């Protein structure tokens, strides 16, 4: 087994450092994932590479939607999943695997709605990023908080979510915990400050036996 200094558990060398930890920050759009990722990045050592789906792909996605005659606000649904999201997530996973190979931690920021609800889909994501260690941080939210924050950020790509808000909330289930091992971060209005919550979780992540299991 490789250790952080590039040595195996038998004392031999492995030829390089152990892969960096992948932190997956997931939750509903507007729930606070990007804010949580910023806090996490300031606490993880060594500093991680942050790969945020919207930062990486927002402009490209807009062009794909326009080229196919789709509405600019269409960021959910069967067509989007099959023609856009699959490539977003595939690119993020491949990049994470490459970045972490030399020991750099990675923070992935995306909803991952299917992956956190289905064990097989989660296992496929873990495999795609290069295997363990992978830590899931789930942003807990609620409908009122989501509506307030989505309205507050004023993004045109959120139009589809707001137009069918009840269906959107039912689909993302902001207050239903994942069915795979995870840690919860409460991002609802009035919750404990993120820094305190995340600091405890980063400290707990020093060993697999202390990381929270599915709840």
Image (cartoon, rainbow, N blue to C red):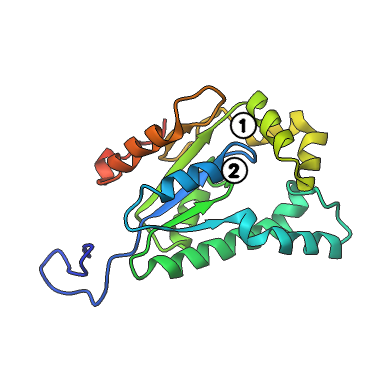
Q: Residue furthest right?
A: 69
Residue 7, image x, y percentages: 17, 69
Relative side of 178 to 156, left or right: left
User: Cα distance, mark 2 to mark 1?
Assistant: 9 Å
Quarter of the picture containing the N terminus is bottom left
Which residue occupies the extreme bottom position in the image? 15
Which quarter of the figure has residue 147? top right
Tag 1 or tag 2, which sits nearer the N-term?
Answer: 2
Q: Position of residue 129 (x, y in %)?
A: 45, 61
Q: Position of residue 94 (x, y in %)?
A: 51, 67
Q: Please tell me which residue is depicted at 54% across the width and 47% down the height of the picture.
A: 115
Residue nearest the viewer, comparing 97 with 159: 159
- Tag 1 secondary structure: loop
Q: Residues within 10 Å of mark 2 (few under 14, many from 20)?
A: some
Instruction: Count the labels in the image.
Output: 2
Q: Which residue is mark 1?
A: 173
Seen from the viewer's position, the closer of residues 126 and 190 is 190
Answer whether labels 2 and 1 touch (C-beta < 8 Å). Answer: yes
User: Between residues 186 and 180, which one lies in front from this camera angle?
Assistant: 186
Mark 2 highlights which residue?
113
For the C terminus, which image quadrant?
top left
């Amino acid at each position: 087994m490789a250790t952080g200094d590039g040595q195996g558990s038998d004392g031999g060398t492995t030829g390089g450092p152990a892969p960096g930890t992948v932190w997956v920050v997931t939750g509903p759009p507007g729930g606070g994932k990007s804010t949580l990722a910023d806090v996490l990045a300031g606490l993880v050592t060594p500093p991680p590479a942050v790969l945020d789906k919207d930062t990486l792909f927002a402009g490209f996605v807009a062009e794909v939607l326009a080229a196919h005659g789709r509405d600019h606000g269409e960021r959910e649904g069967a067509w989007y999943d099959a023609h856009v999201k699959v490539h977003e997530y595939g690119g993020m996973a491949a990049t994470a695997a490459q970045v972490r190979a030399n020991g750099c931690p990675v923070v992935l920021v995306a909803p991952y709605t299917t992956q956190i609800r289905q064990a097989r889909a989660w296992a496929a994501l873990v495999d795609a990023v290069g295997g363990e260690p992978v830590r899931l941080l789930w942003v807990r939210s609620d409908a009122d908080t989501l509506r307030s924050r989505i309205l507050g950020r004023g993004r045109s790509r959120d139009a589809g979510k707001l137009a069918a808000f009840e269906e959107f909330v039912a689909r993302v289930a902001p207050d239903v915990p994942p069915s795979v091992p995870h840690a919860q971060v409460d991002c609802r209005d009035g919750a404990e400050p993120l820094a305190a919550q995340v600091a405890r979780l980063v400290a707990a992540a020093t060993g697999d036996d202390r990381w929270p299991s599915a709840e």
